[in-house]
Amino acid sequence: MKKALVMLASAIAMSGAFAQTPAPAAAPASASAPAAKAGHERNVEDRIAYLHTQLKITSAQESQWNAFADVMRNNGQTMGQLFQQRKASGNLSAIDDMKQYADITQAHADGMKKLVDAFDPLYSSFSPEQKKLADVTFHQPGGVAGGGRAQHHGKRAGKAAPASDADVKP
């Protein structure tokens, strides 16, 4: 259960970094990989659109914004591929499971570094009002994670948090 929560938090973190909108409902088990991919891509695009509006991006900031949005898309694609590989792996040995999780964790860290590097020039171009909006938006529960940061004892905070740990399905 704990492993599933960590995996879920990682997936949410990279699929829509910086957004406060809840993740869409999970696709049915019978859904094909292309259909699941389309939903994941739509979720990333929804988060990009949300942030564009929330941060009041101006036409003068579009080039920096587009670079940032492209990193979000690339990070989401990378994490989506890694999680698809993990799902397709089936029954792994403990060491292979740990290695695969280490790869996901490293990809997450690398993606966040790229995201910070892309966000820095955009943030520098912000007006004082936009900086305040960004500071509030990214500091709220769920900020970077997008769907709720993991807190003590695996509980989540934010708008999309379940009412209790019992509401989280493995």
Image: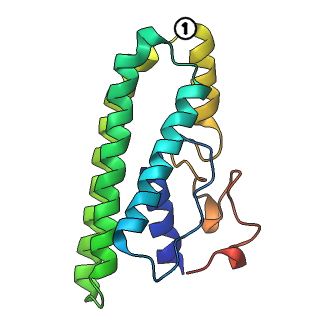
Q: Residue at x 41, y 52 (%)?
A: 41
**Residue at 34 percent of width and 78 percent of height:** 87
- For label 1, the residue is 127
Up-down relation of residue 97 to residue 80 (above or below): below
Q: Quadrant of residue 151?
A: bottom right
Spot occupied by residue 122 in the image (x, y as percentages of width and height): 41, 19
Residue pictured at 25% horizontal, 89% vertical = 93
Quarter of the view holding residue 156: bottom right
The crowding category of the residue bearing disc 1, from other C-alpha atoms within 10 Å (few below 14, some 14 to 19, many at least 20), is few
Residue 125 seen in this snapshot: no
The x and y percentages for residue 109 are: 32, 49
* Badge 1 amino acid: Ser
Q: How is the image coloured?
A: rainbow
Locate the N terminus and report the quarter of the image it occupies: bottom right
Q: Tell me: residue 31, above or below residue 150.
A: below
Position above or below: 92 against 144: below
Q: Position of residue 10 (x, y in %)?
A: 44, 60
In the rendered structure, the answer to whether residue 139 lies left or right of residue 40 reads: right
Q: Quadrant of the image for the C terminus?
A: bottom right
- Viewer-proximal residue, 111 or 80? 80
